[in-house]
Amino acid sequence: MAQAIAFYFIAACILGFAVLVVTTRDTVHSVLFLVLDFLFVAALYVLLGAQFLAAIQVLVYAGGIVVLYLFVVMLVNLKRPPEAHEDPHRRTKLGFGLAAAVLLELGAIAVYGSVNPAAPMPATPAIPVSGNTEQVGWLLYTSYLIPFEIASMLLLVAMIGAIVLAKREL
Amino acid sequence: MTTYPILSMITFLPVLAGAAIFVCSERVARWLALAGSLATLAISAPLYSHFDKGSTGLQFVESVPWIPSWNVVYSVGIDGISLPFIFLSTVVSVLCVGASWTAVQMRVREFYASLLLAETAMIGLFAATNLFLFYVFWELMIVPMFLLIGVWGGPRRIHAAIKFLLFTLAGSVLMLVGLITLLRASGTLDFQALAATRPNAALQSWLFVAFTAAFAVKVPMFPVHTWLPDAHTEAPTAGSVILAGILLKMGGYGLLRIALPILPDAVRLFRGPMLALSAIAIVYGAYVTLAQTDVKRLIAYSSISHMGFVTLGIFTLNRNGIEGAILQMVNHGIVTGALFLCVGMIYERTHTREIAAYGGVAKLAPIYSTFLALFCLAAAGLPGLNSFVGEFLIISGAFDTRPWYGVMAVWGVALGTTYILWLYYRVALGEVKPGLRALRLDLDLREVATLAPMAALVLTIGLYPESVLGFLRTSVAQLVVASAASAAVVGGM
Amino acid sequence: MISSLNAIVPMLCVTAAGLAAMVAESFRDPGERMPIAGLGIVGLVGAAVATLLLWNHNVSSFGVVSADNFGLFVTWILIIVGALSIAFSGPTVERERLPAGEYYALMLFAIAGMMLMATASDLLIIFLALEVLSIAVYVLTGIRRDSAQASEAAFKYFLLGAFSSTFFLYGIAFTYGLTGSTHLDRVGSLIAAQAMAPTPMQLLAVGFLLVGFAFKVSAVPFHMWTPDAYEGAPPAVTGFMSTGVKAAAFAAFARVFLTAFEPLRGDWGVILSVVAGATMIVGTVVGVAQSNVKRMLAYSSIAHGGYLLVALIAANDVGKGAVLFYLLTYAVTNLGAFGVIAVLDNGDRANDRVSDYAGLWNEHPGLAALMTIFLLSLGGFPPMAGFIAKWYVFSAAVKAGDNALAIIGVLTSVVSVFFYLRIVVMMYMTSSSQPLRFPAVPKIASVALAVSAILIFYLGILPTRVLDWAAESISTIF
């Protein structure tokens, strides 16, 4: 019962602050409300017994995001002229060479993977560890390995996208 | 019987020639188109010499699985009903190539390619023995015809082309719905199998409405005829000839091939309205024709009247009527095609289609006027010329079943004689119009060579109608028996 | 089902090519030309080889990515889409001075996301893949940064897309709450095991997922973003997203609804039928009123989404290959049409109004002929592929008893012919007052256009083999 009350209270706060984030005219206030929102989400995790996740939520989102906002704003305005080089094609050759190397390497990995099939995945065993942090780690690197990796790809795409759209001169 | 795939050859030879045209120069294009259409005509010869007139089945059959998982077969074959139309298609195509030799100067290659694609579609349609293939060729015909009218037509060509498209597509969409429904009900699309396993009477009525809507647009029957005058008037000569000569026949052929054998109960149900619409087309078409001042429009409206005879003949549902209808379609193709050729030839010289601008052409162009007179008399139904036989058969068929419609048809013939002879009087006789004197009006050798085969056909069929009727007698008899048998079964139930 | 890493090899190839493109770009001097597109083609060829090798092996990686033949068929479609899009992109990238490395990298990442979405068998993976491809496509939409129209389009697309993602995620959350799993097999068996009458929870889960997918396939009433996004993006990107995103989204759509939520078909079938009917009608009717070719094709692609929905609803024993065959046909045809638009865009003028096509036949007879082929195929004329595809869908619908949908489909596809033929009328039957406004056609693009046209005729005249493949492929999932 107490848990249910806590849940509804936290959920209401999350919703309320989320509305404030988008309705506030002042950007700084908006970001601060976002921080509050993240904090309440962390509280929700605590309520669910996921303390590690809650800690990460506070560290990464509530802490990191705000800093990142500032950095992004500053970085985008940074501008430095490209340095000239005596051989204009040197960089091209180097770049293409490196690109080919990357392609080759990844291709080799792919080919290796297909000629040497990995050992069959063990059926996900009952989680052998007990701590909250270990459980998250175990899950991330067994059942949720692929989603984990795709999420990193997602971040890469988002990063490229943000740079392409926001940077003044490419 | 021949062993090589003759029907596929004549179907696809034109389109291959059409594709080959794109790699040669414009000068060669004309000759290549002529060679392609002539070769098609030539290799179709065994169809007539080896045709078994006594057989009721399909002949020259070819059947290859096309999309096995859907049970769709590429199958072609002909019987007595399709043969005359194939003949008409191959002949008219050759003449169209000839008729546009000098008239078309713009985008020659594309013009002939469209023409030849249209020929493939027409022959394929008449040779198809299943509904899927029939529909494919039916649709295939639309695009080249649309381009022929819209690109090489007269000043209001876009309007005419779009109107043509609107009507045709509206018809073919209903046909597609009918097609899918029929497939679901019968599980097959083969004409013979469909005729053997007919859908129930209620479904037949719906299917009849769907299919007949498509066919009626093409014929064209009375309320959906309005695209025809525009299309005819604006199309280039070759386009008009194909329209009159073949495209309109697709509708009549569809009625004979699909409505009568597959949906006989519905045909009986809708017979009254169809006959009435046919009679209206005959009389109304004739009156409107009388009022025309533009030569091409006049012939176009006369087409509506003449095609009214065709549908009247088909829906008499007796042998005379149906034989007459088929013969009338062939005759109309020849005569109206020839009249459009005549109009096109003189239009190239005078650049006007107003009847009032002509007069006394007979004095200036005796050869031309002789041909024109022959075709006009044929169109008027003079005994001894081809149209007489068809109209006579249709009228006698009508008197056998519904005499009042026979009376209407006779009235239509009388009106037809009036407007066509009046046309000839205004164009060829009387005072020579001053503007015409300076022009070289008479025909050159190429034009005579284009018209002469038409004239020969007019005389041959007129004097010896058995030359056509002989081919179709057995098939028509079978068709009449088959559709009557069904009615008896239904009546007994 | 064999478990190994192999199932993700096609995606790895494409991703590797994307990374390579990024590396190459970082060493490019400003204004210098570099054949970065070639790297993309290499990656796609690698993916194609991998797909061939995986065919019929039914491999699964990590239990969440399954390279069954269904997924591989869609992967094939995506490879074709990718190769053609890259071929059409060349002129746009050069003329608009777009950042080539980022452009191609984003395109390749989007393709990798699409492939993943097509082969994923876990809702979580589907969501992540959806996000990967969506974010890449949002950015591609707005990649012409100096164009206000492009920015507006990208922003609209992004906002509505993010909105739809939330719906999708919410649907996943409900599904997880119901079944304790996001894996499609387990979800399916648990839903089948639950009570016969659907619970409100189940309906909510299905409903939210449906909304999420409907956004991505631009089904009415979630289609609002489509015309703006399609108009604002560079034509090559529009072609890419109108075909690739649709193929991936429909693959996942089919997989989720025909496997996991198959037991609830009675419920979602009805909703989807209404949506499909509305999509066909709105796409066609509004399409008639357009004067911009890209907007017109946007509405046409909405209508085609409707036909695909019909194929999905009618996916029964006879018609289950229809979705795949239609996707392939639509992808080739629509990309071809956008390819023509892309090569006609000459920088100063987009040449994308219907009236800009006046007299195209006189200047570029080949392009006009190709455009005619693409448009006729979109309209469903024989002997083009579009006819066979539509026939497949409509006859499947009739066989499944959805007569109303089949009739709406036939009627709307005829109405759509009018707007397709408006362009044909413009190209062939009118002449332009200002000649020579069209740029020369680059070789690679013309080869790609010719390949599309050949594929269209191949699929239209000799469809048997591909039809059988499509039917066999989809049998691997249900």
Image: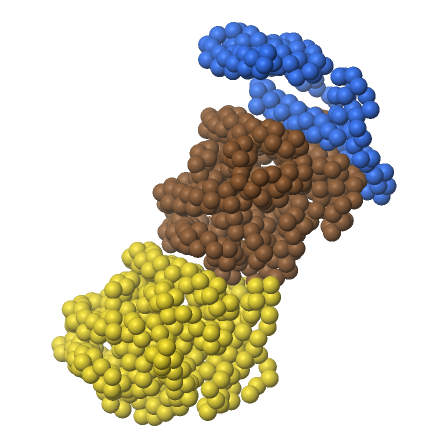
Chain colours: A blue, B yellow, C brown
Numbered marks: total: 0
Residue farthest left in this picture: B431
Residue C364: % across, % down: 49, 50
Residue B26 in view here: no
Q: Position of residue A109 (x, y in %)?
A: 82, 36
Q: Residue at x 52, y 51 (%)?
A: C314
**In the image shown, does A100 or C50 lie closer to the viewer?**
C50
Evaluate whether residue B178 shows in this view. Answer: yes
Side of A86 relative to B16 (left or right): right
Residue C282 position by quadrant = top left
In the picture shown, does residue A26 fall above or below B305? above
Q: Look at the picture and state if A139 lies above or below B327.
A: above
Residue B183 image offset from top left, x and y in percent: 48, 65
Q: Picture coordinates of residue B188 (x, y %)? A: 51, 69
Residue nearest the viewer, comparing C11 with C364: C11
| Image quadrant where one finds the N terminus of chain B | bottom right
In front of the other: B271 or A45: A45
| Residue drawn at (44%, 73%) of the image | B198
Query: Would you place residue A60 above or below residue B483 in this image?
Result: above
Say which quadrant the C terminus of chain B sits in. Answer: bottom left
Location of residue B114 (image quadrant): bottom left
For image coordinates 81% across by 21% down, the residue present is A129
**Would residue C85 be found to the left or right of residue B371 on screen?**
right
Which of the 4 image quadrants contains residue B452?
A: bottom left
Query: Residue at 56% of width from left, 13% of height from top?
Result: A5
